[in-house]
Image (spheres, rainbow, N blue to C red):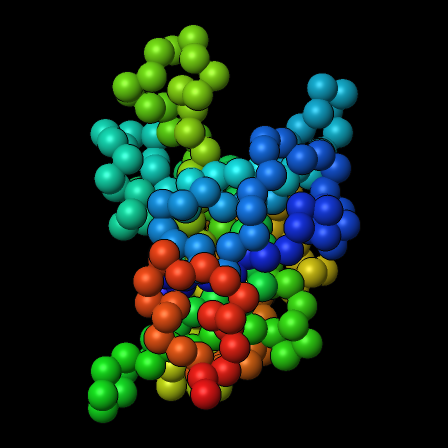
Amino acid sequence: MCGRFVSAQSDGQLQLLFEVDERVGEQLAPSWNVAPTQTVRIIVEETAEDGTPTRQLRNARWGLLPVWAKDRKMGSRMINARSETVTEKPAFRAAATKRRCVVPADGYYEWQQGERGKVPYYLHAEDASTLAFAGLYELWPDPEIAEDDPAKWVWTCTILTRPASDALGHVHDRTPVILPYEMVGDWLDKSTRDKSEVATLIDAIPEPNLVPRQIGRAVGSPRNNHPGLIEAAG
């Protein structure tokens, strides 16, 4: 699974890297310990008034809420979606064919079970490049907010996961689905709406080539949030 990650790049850096046309919403502070239900940045493709595709950088709550969710509590259980079943599961299948996004990250954290408890690792690209997690998003109508209030529709998201390769499987048996930069456009393309086409697209995403680094246990608390969290354990 992916339960914590790092998102420290500036909006400007992400806009350049992912060729974003428009920033929607307020900027977020860099975070070295993003936790479930917090607000994160996602990249989506919307249609402009003249009908042309527009790539946007937006904010979303991490933890998908299907339109039929009764309250926000469900989101904490929906931070990840298994790529193998995402086109079939009721909570994800609509978003898989209509609302795909990219969740940018510097890297993510995982815990390996050891003899003396769980050992935290930071997993990142070998060249320290930004990762493009394949994600889904939904707009959830908050029943506690008036219909005419702009805050009525809450943007939420989830990160797809897949079985980990041998190189990472010793840390955890699941890993995020990470898009090569050249596949970002394919993933965001809203003309791909058939679930079999989406499944084929997911199958075509290569396994990530990541480097695991053992780090200190301070990352275990979301209250700890600083660059030192990703440094190698002493």
Q: Residue at x 60, y 44 (%)?
A: 43
Q: Quadrant of residue 162?
A: bottom left
Picture quarter with the C terminus = bottom left
- Residue 84 visible, this orientation: no
- Residue 106 visible, this orientation: yes
212 on left or right of 184: left
Say above or below: 212 vs 206: below
Tell me where residue 82 appears, x and y as whole percent.
37, 59
Tell me where residue 91 appears, x and y as whole percent.
32, 42
Say above or below: 47 vs 90: above
233 on left or right of 26: left
Q: Residue at x 44, y 21 (%)?
A: 151
Say above or below: 161 vs 171: above
Say above or below: 11 vs 120: above
- Asked whether 56 or 219 is in front, the reply is 219
Q: Residue at x 42, y 29 (%)?
A: 154
Picture quarter with the N terminus = bottom left
- Asked whether 198 or 15 is in front, the reply is 15
Tell me where residue 127 appears, x and y as whole percent.
68, 76
Q: Quadrant of residue 104?
A: bottom right
Residue that extends furthest to the top in the rendered view of this protein: 148
Residue that extends furthest to the bottom in the rendered view of this protein: 115
Q: Residue at x 33, y 24 (%)?
A: 142
Count every numbered label the image shows and give the total.
0
Tell me where residue 89 appears, x and y as whole percent.
32, 48
69 on left or right of 207: left
